Amino acid sequence: MNLLNNLTLVKKIIFQISKPILNPILSLKNIHKGESCYIFGDGISIKWFDLKEFTNKPVFSLNKIAFHKQSNFLNLKYSLFIEPFYFYPYFWDRDKATVEETGKKFFKNNIQNKFRDIIGQQNNTTFFINLSNYPVLRNPKINYLFQFIHDDESNFLKECYQNNENIFKGSLRSAISLAIYMGFDEIFLVGCDYTHQITRSHHWFEKGYGKIKKQPKYQENFLNIAKKYAKLTTITLEGSGTFLKSKTYKEFTGKEPSFKENYDLMESSMLKTLSKDPWFKDKIF
């Protein structure tokens, strides 16, 4: 218990010291009030979707969607790379199975420079990065995130904190929280496959079709809170959402889904970079 209390105290101290770095996010409150948006995840369902069908709303892109060959058709208004220490030269692998398999705890970060290039090239995109990366990554287009947003007047934030829901735990939760804070009242989830009742394993940039599986109710408590403040609809390849409202890709676009392999969707140089990471070993080629 003492260790937990000490960690909580450390986080509070970090937050207080970092307020000048974190507070710019307050200026984004309600700037999109009454609008709708897309949140694009990395689910394998993206392999069946034509991104040209999603050009009519601002987009929050999560993780690697910015490297999709069709991402230039999207209005990439916001992009999230929220993994702690993501822009350092080495990854610390906390996955016990991977460590046991490779015998290594640290791996060279092959992808960080690709993300740095994206940040440098996309002049009309605002980026959200974990505060831990501040010492090695500075750019006026970046907003830094840590634990929570200090805004006592936001009912959504207050309800999350009262229910011990960390708004920045994972990229999808972060994007939904930011979208609601910015005032979006309608949010469409695309490639957010954990919210599908019937989904497939793997990501869109990995080879193959994935394996069909049933998905448990993902982040149920948080999403039930979020649904009070914005209309959430998840776009599925087939079937419905777990407990969110849903539309299939065909229902939403009027077009039939059409499968494309990862090499059709991502440049070979990026696929080669991903293949060097232990998490994607033997999953790219």
Image (cartoon, rainbow, N blue to C red):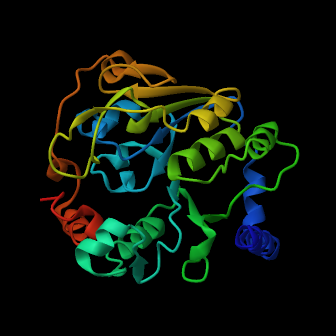
Image-based side of 218 in relation to 50, left or right: right
Estimate the x, y position of residue 278 in percent, counting from the top left.
Answer: 26, 70
User: Which is more toward the observer, 65 or 155?
Assistant: 155
Q: Please state the horizontal and vertical placement of residue 152, each as a whole percent of the image.
A: 87, 48
Quarter holding the C terminus is bottom left
Q: Is residue 124 above or below residue 183?
A: below
Nearest the viewer among 18 and 210 is 210
Return the residue found at the far left.
285
Image spot of residue 146 (x, y percent): 67, 64
Q: Is residue 77 visible?
A: no
From the top left corner, tell me how far across and down residue 81 is, in percent: 49, 61
Q: Name the residue at 30% across, 39% down.
A: 46
Residue drawn at (56%, 75%), measured in percent from left and top? 133
Q: Is residue 128 left or right of residue 165?
A: left
Residue at the extreme right: 153
Identify the residue at image location x=46%, y=49%: 61
User: Dividing the picture into quarters, in which one does residue 260 lie?
Assistant: top left
